[in-house]
Image (tube, rainbow, N blue to C red):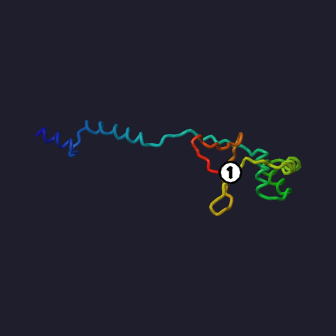
């Protein structure tokens, strides 16, 4: 008879007072490992545009000098009178840009800009390469 009661306890037919507390900690531990943990707050760094960025953006938007001055002044939150000589100086000198625009499949320019720094790299033929005239 005692064997039948023990078998019922194991199958869940009858639960004794000692069986219930043993099962609870396992369930609580499993739940606590699945609960989302609080993460630290994200730190957002705000970098205002540089003067070169504002001038470049204004030149990309329009060819009119007066509108470029207005755009750059709005981006920099500066008066247009302060930016006028700087923008006119930037227009006067030809830019040897290190920026490469990647054309899209349709031939239009995409928003991808690759800026290179340092000296330009040239490809050298490998020592095992054969040149054909």
For label 1, the SS is strand
Image quarter in which the N terminus is found: top left
* Residue 104 visible in the picture: yes
Between 41 and 69, the one nearer to me in the picture: 69
Residue labelled with disc 1: 113
Residue 79 seen in the figure: no
Q: Nearer the viewer, residue 73 or 51?
A: 51
Query: Which residue is pictured at 88% across the width and 48% down the height?
Result: 85
Q: Quadrant of residue 40?
A: top right
How many badges with numbers are in the image? Answer: 1
The outermost residue toward the bottom is 106
Disc 1 crowd, CA 10 A, few/some/many (<14, 14-19, 20+): few
Left or right? Give the position of 68 relative to 124. right
Residue 104, image x, y percentages: 64, 59
Residue for point 76% across, 52% down: 57
> Farthest residue in the left direction?
1
Give the image location of residue 28, x and y in percent.
Answer: 37, 39
Q: Residue 72's spot in the image, x, y percent?
A: 80, 51
> Looking at this view, is 29 or 115 the one in front?
115
Horizontal placement of 41 versus 122: left or right? left
Left or right: residue 63 compared with residue 25: right
User: Residue shown at 51%/40% (left/top)?
Assistant: 38
Residue 121 in percent (x, y) is at 68, 42
Q: Quadrant of residue 51?
A: top right
Task: Please name the residue shown 83% across and 47% down the image.
Answer: 78
Nearer to us in this view, 75 or 110: 110
């Amino acid at each position: 008879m005692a064997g039948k009661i023990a078998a019922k306890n194991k199958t869940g037919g009858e639960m004794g007072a000692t069986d219930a507390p043993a099962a609870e900690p396992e369930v609580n531990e499993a739940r606590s490992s699945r609960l989302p943990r609080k993460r630290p707050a994200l730190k957002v760094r705000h970098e205002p545009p540089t003067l070169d960025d504002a001038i470049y953006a204004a030149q990309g938007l329009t060819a009119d000098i007066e509108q470029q001055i207005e755009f750059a002044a709005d981006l920099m939150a500066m008066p247009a009178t302060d930016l006028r000589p700087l923008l006119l100086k930037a227009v006067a000198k030809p830019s040897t840009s290190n920026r490469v625009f990647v054309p899209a499949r349709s031939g239009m320019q995409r928003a991808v800009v690759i800026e290179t720094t340092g000296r330009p790299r040239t490809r050298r033929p490998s020592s095992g390469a054969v040149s054909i005239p």
